[in-house]
Image: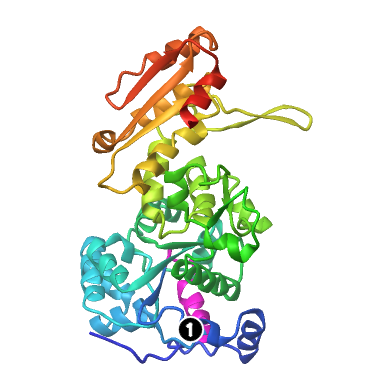
Amino acid sequence: MSNKCLSPCNRNSGLPFLKILLISRRTKPLSTYSSLVGEKNIVLMGAPGAGKTTVGRFVGQITGLPVIDVDDDVLEKTWLMSVAKKLQEVGGDLFLEEEGKALQRFSTSGSVLSLTGSNPMHRASMQHMKSNGIVVYLDVPLEDILERLERMKVDRIVGQEPGVSMKEILQYRRPFYHQWYDVRVLCESGESAEAIAVKVLEAVKRYQDITPETFISTRSTTEDSEARKDSVFFSDVVVEGLASDGGLYVPATKLPKLTPGEWQRLVDVPYIERAQVLLELCIHPSDVPAIKLQEMLARAYGQNFSCTEVAPVRHLTGNQFLLELFHGPTASFKDLALQLLPQLFAFCIPRTCNYLILVATSGDTGSAVLDGFSRLSDTDKERISVLTFFPEEGISQIQKAQMISYQDKNVGVIGVQSHFDFCQSALKQ
């Protein structure tokens, strides 16, 4: 089954002309987006009630691309019955299988597709969608979704049965959404579909073009155009560490900004998810795909931190608060960076290369480095080793005991009969 010519609005919604005018005033000209994806599809994914269908219509109107709603234009046309009736007839498990097979048989290009809320639970059909599409996850606040579903009286959601709350269904599905997306659109509470559509297109545009997201040295003294010639990408920064002129790498352009509403979304989420959202904005997906970043963060900030909040903020008194950064495996604040960095390093280096990393430490850094790299997979330990140098008389006995306790095959420690500055300068030479 294929389709290339469905109209942008195929649910007889009769969107007011005024809204179309509002979109044209808020967004860039049509020509800016018309060739954005070429033959690829923009695939909108999210929970039931996330607004995929409505947002898809607006994306179609802005770009001029045909819009396909999987519920109406694929499933119901394939089954010749409503989705609700099909679910009632066959039950949840068989419904997921038949839904997935119907989507696998469907193909199109250069279109906007609005998936069902349960499509991501079928692996083969999602692999089919990703093969010719950019999957955009509409990350909508749970409270907004629950309110919409209650108002809409939706009765065609897989898993709806007595004793199971809608919140439980949505929480169960969330890992499936996280597994498949290429880019995430963080939606504010109450944000309009028009505004989300613009975010979708900006996210797709960023996904397609890595060139603006480069890094330059802090010691660069040339004009901007000249500095950009020597710029590198995030994966290069991770591997190289320092710039060739001895400077530190910084973004060539400004850091991404979040709106107050987007910051508010991150207040109550777990540390790992908060870190993922922020790092996705700073690391281009062509350097580190979202699913790989998710896996690294789970390894870096999972069971190895003694506090589930990782870096909790404690209220002292009045307007005084304390950020606790000592819950990592070595009780050093450097664990926050050095539990993740080895994972990034192992991912970014060429698979055919072996690396020996030399480290000079005056105390806490050494044990944090050793612990982080000792947690790599056995395969990565074969490619990456760390040798740490410390001044014998310049650190505490606890720090020394921590470092010499690491016995993994890819880490080693050497005490030097001198001071830290000697250790550091010797390695730099």
In this view of the protein, which residue sits in the foreground, 389 or 9? 389
- The answer to whether one can see residue 103 in this image is yes
Side (left or right) of 362 relative to 167: right
- Assign the magenta stretch its main secondary structure: helix
Q: Residue at x 26, y 86 (%)?
A: 2
User: 169 or 303: which is nearer to us?
Assistant: 303
Going by the numbered disc 1, the residue's amino acid type is: Gly
Q: Position of residue 313 (x, y in %)?
A: 63, 32
Where does residue 210 sit, x and y in percent of width and height? Answer: 47, 65
Element type at mark 1: helix
- What residue lies at 54% left-to-right and 65% top-to-bottom? 212
In the rendered image of this protein, does residue 17 appear above or below residue 118? below
Residue 226 coordinates in the image, percent (x, y): 59, 63
Identify the coloring.
rainbow
The answer to whether residue 242 is above or below residue 409 is: below
Figure quadrant of residue 159: bottom left
> In the image, is residue 54 part of the stretch drawn in magenta?
yes
The quadrant in which the N terminus is found is bottom left
Can see residue 187? no
- At which x and y percent is residue 312? 58, 32
Query: Vertically, is 194 above or below 173?
Result: below
Left or right: 83, with 324 as reference point: left
Q: In this rendering, is residue 351 above or below 177?
A: above
Q: Which residue is mark 1?
A: 60
In the image, residue 297 lies in the stretch drawn in magenta: no
Stretch in magenta? 45-62
CA neighbours of label 1 inside 10 A, class few (<14), some (14 to 19), many (20+)? many
Query: Residue extending furthest right?
Result: 318
Q: Closest to the observer: 274 or 337?
A: 337
Count of numbered badges drawn on the protein: 1
Q: Nearer the viewer, residue 390 or 262?
A: 390
